[in-house]
Amino acid sequence: MPKGYWVAHVDVHDAEAYERYKAANAAPFAEYGARFLVRGGDQQVREGQARRRTVVIEFPSIEAALACYDSPAYQAARALRDPVSEGDLVIVAGYEG
C-alpha cells in the first residue's frame, strides 16, 4: 500500500495567527500518523514560480492522508489558516515502483 503525501506551497500573511493553525493541526496529524518531511525550510526556485513556504507531510497511506484532510479536527484547524494565508495543496499517493 503506497504512502500518502500532502505537498503544500503557502504564503503566510500573519505569522502569529498561523502559529495557532499549527497548534490546532497537531492533534489530527498525530491521529492519522503524519510525519513532516519538509516544513518551510530554505528553498531555491529553479524553474517556474513557488510560494514562500513549502511543506511535505508523509502519511502511512493515501487513505490516511485523505481522511486527515477531511476530518472535522483538521477542517477546524484549516479555518484558522485560511484567513491568514494563501496556498496550494496536493494530496498524492507515493510511488512504489
Image (cartoon, rainbow, N blue to C red):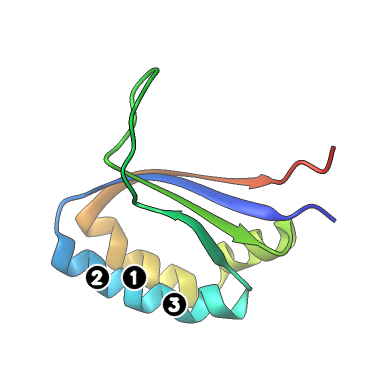
Disc 1 to disc 3, C-alpha distance: 7 Å
Q: In this view, does 59 lie to the left or right of 21?
A: right
Q: What amino acid type should be assigned to the residue bearing mark 1?
A: Lys
Task: State the residue in front, 11 or 57.
Answer: 57
Looking at the image, is 57 positioned above or below residue 51? below
Per the rendering, the mark at residue 93 is none
Question: Badge 2 is on which residue?
Answer: 19
The residue located at (44%, 46%) in the rendering is: 8
Quarter of image, res 19: bottom left
Q: What amino acid type should be assigned to the residue bearing mark 2?
A: Glu
Q: Is mark 2 on a helix, strand or loop?
A: helix
Looking at the image, is 35 positioned above or below residue 50? below
Disc 3 to disc 2, C-alpha distance: 11 Å
Q: Is residue 35 left or right of residue 23?
A: right
List x then y, in percent, for residue 58. Answer: 60, 58
Looking at the image, is 87 positioned above or below residue 26? above
Q: Is mark 1 on a helix, strand or loop?
A: helix
List x then y, in percent, for residue 56. Answer: 50, 51
Disc 1 to disc 2, C-alpha distance: 5 Å
Question: Badge 3 is on which residue?
Answer: 26
Q: Please report contact status of discs 1 and 2: CB closer than 8 Å, yes or no.
A: yes
Q: Of all residues shown, which one is farthest toward the top? A: 47
The residue located at (48%, 82%) in the rendering is: 27
